[in-house]
Every structure is written in C-alpha cells, then in structure tokens.
Amino acid sequence: MSDPAARAGAILSIDLAALCANWRVLADRVGPRSQAAAVVKADAYGLGAAHVAPALLAAGCRRFVVATLDEGIALRPLLPGADILILSGPLPGGEADFHAYGLLPVLNSPEQIAGWAAFARSSGERLAAVLHVDTGMSRLGLRLSEVRALAEDRETLSAIDLKLIMSHLACADEVGHPLNRRQLENFNAARASFPDLPGSLAASSGIFLGADWHADWVRPGAALYGVNPLPGRPNPMRQVVRLQGRILQVRDVDAGDTVGYGATHRCTAPTRLAIVAAGYADGLFRSLGNRGCGQLGEIRVPLIGRVSMDLTIFDVGAVPQTLARPGAVIDLIGPANDVDAVAQAAGTIGYEVLTALSPRYCRTYVGEALQ
Ligand SMILES: *Cc1c(COP(=O)(O)O)cnc(C)c1O
C-alpha cells in the first residue's frame, strides 16, 4: 500500500510539541500557586484525545477533563495515575460506571449529589467527587443557596469525599466584562462554605484575567490547541493544527464562467481554478463559500463559489503554474490562515472549526511530546 499521507485528499497535521509547549506556557503562567489541568473533551477538540492526552501526560499534566462518561472510559487506560473529571456527572443510575472505571464525577445538581451519596453508602465507601457551582452562567452547577445547604448536610458529606469546588466563566474572553468580577465574587462566596477545598474557576481565557481568577487549578482547553484566548489581541499560543488540501485538477476559465453549485461566483476575467479534495463533509464550513481563503506558498488564494461536500474551489490565477498543479497542496488552515482566521471567515469561533474536523482526513502527528 502507498503512503497514506501521499495518497490522501487532505492531510491534517497535529503538532504535539506545540501542544505541549502551549500547556507549559499556561502552567507556568499560573504556577506555582495554581496548577494546569487539560480539557480533552470532544476528542481533544477534534485533534484526537488518544494522542493528545498521553502527550500531555508525558509533559507533566496530571488532571484531565472530559464531558462524557464514555470519553472518560476511553481515556482511562491511557492516563495511568491521572485524575479524569467527567463534566456531565452521572445520569440517574449511572454511578457504578464512574466508580468501576476510577473516574471523578463532577456533581452539578442536588439530584446528582444525592445519587452519588446513595451509591457511596450502598458501596460502603466514601467516594470522591468534584462540586460544580453556577456563579452566573445558568448552565450546570449548584446555586449558591444550594451550596450553603450542602455545607450543613453532614449526612451527605459523610458519604462524599469532595476533592474540588469548580465553576465556569461565561465572558472570560471579554476582559472588561463586569460578569467576570461578579462570578469571581460569587465563587469566593461559595468557597467560604467549603474553606478547605481546592478551587477551579478559569478555562483558557480566564487564565489571562489575572491571578485572582487562578484559584488552585485552571482548566484550559482551546488555548492548548492554538485557539487565541485573547480575541482581538496577539495570540500567545502556538498553532497546533495544519490542514492541507490536495489539488485534484487545475482548469482555465473564461470571463463570464460561473463556479460551483448555485453559480454563486461569476468570473470577471480569465483565470485558473484549483479544485481541492476537501469539502463540508470534512468540516470545511459551507459558510466559507465566497468568503474563505487558502494559502499556496506565499500567495493567498480566494475560495470561490460554494463549498461542496468533497470539493472546494480556489482562484489560483495569481500563482505560478509550477506551484498550482495537481498533487500540490493548499493550506486550508496553516501559519498564514490560522484557526481563528478561518473561524472568522466562516462566521464562527475557532472551537467549532476544530471540533468539526472530520475523521476522513489523513491525520499525522508530528513533533515529539516535550518531556
Ligand atoms: C469546555 C470547558 C472548559 C475548557 O474551556 P476552554 O475555553 O476551551 O479553555 C473548561 N471548563 C468547563 C466547565 C468546560 O465546559
């Protein structure tokens, strides 16, 4: 069989050295009083948790966060000795799996707390868990009044070994947003009920709000993968992904020719088009049609017409023919058009660009993990 990368229509390269360097930058920024976990939910934001999580473990990360029980079960054998937090917590009756696989449930509601306490009593052990407080997002987590009530509930607390109290910021990417300070105050009020418990509030952007928000653990996700935690300001993170689409065909078009489904682009002058082997089935958003761009060598090439399921069309009239030829690759995400730039062109955020990356790409992992 030939080399999969050489025959693939599109190649997704994931730089594990850049990933680990990003984790180290964030860990150093909050250290030594606080420590950095790594959020690897949604298959490590689409980059492959089975590669990403062990690389971060080797780099020194000892606490990992996923959204669902199944994500945690898949990672458990790959992360010996590390904590794995499950953000969604147990569904009713689902407690036994958390215990069997050694996963830490995040308890988000009085019902989940009661379920975990009942399971602990029936198993005859005091069982570890994380307490989640809602401080102003109205998503998961206990209300402040419920936190105070729990602090008085000796029977429940005798069954649960709380390891951490956490909350999540709604507006951390807007540095001046008043909710950031209010959520911090609410979080500190909740912590007053559990003064001995370590705390965790900040995700990627929250780390950059300042030391007041760092508490004992921070939980970055997106910034590890190169998404800018400071929208509108220079990106302090290294790029981790590069997505290259292969040119299948280069064709000449005349003035007046239309391009792609719906004929949404009409050429105003003769030019050359490159037809690239990646489309919306690969996670290239249809909203990039007539708005996105690729990069071929030094030259930015406009994406024209609609994105099809398996194909995308670029105007390569400005590119020397020796570069724009079948078999050559165009950067769909790369150093000159990074995840955030692609997201902006598509009208979304870097998070969604990454998590949309499809399994059809040939994935290559480059850069040895830092030890
Ligand atoms: C997804 C998530 C994170 C990570 O957020 P980023 O913005 O990607 O750093 C942290 N905590 C919770 C509760 C989350 O849901």
Image: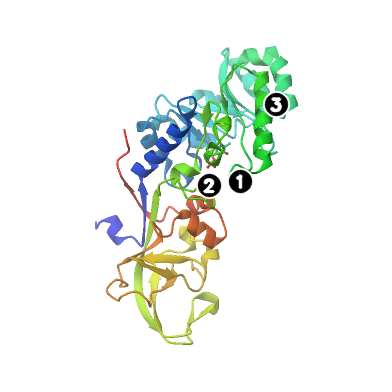
Q: Give the percent coordinates (x, y) of residue 248.
A: 35, 70
| Residue position marked by numbered label 3 in the rendering | 110
Q: Nearer the viewer, mark 3 or mark 1?
A: 1
Q: Is residue 352 left or right of residue 361?
A: right
For the C terminus, give its image quadrant: top left
Q: Residue flagged by tag 3: what amino acid is it?
A: Pro
Q: Earlier in the sequence, mark 3 or mark 1?
A: 3
Between marks 2 and 3, how big is the CA–CA gap?
Answer: 35 Å
| Residue position marked by numbered label 2 in the rendering | 230
Q: Is residue 2 left or right of residue 63?
A: left
Can you say whether 367 is above or below 84 in the image? below
Quadrant where ligand 1 appears: top right
Label 3 crowd (10 A; few <14 / some 14-19 / many >=20): some
Label 2 crowd (10 A; few <14 / some 14-19 / many >=20): many
Q: Residue flagged by tag 1: what amino acid is it?
A: Glu
Between marks 3 and 1, how big is the CA–CA gap?
Answer: 31 Å
Q: Earlier in the sequence, mark 1 or mark 2?
A: 1
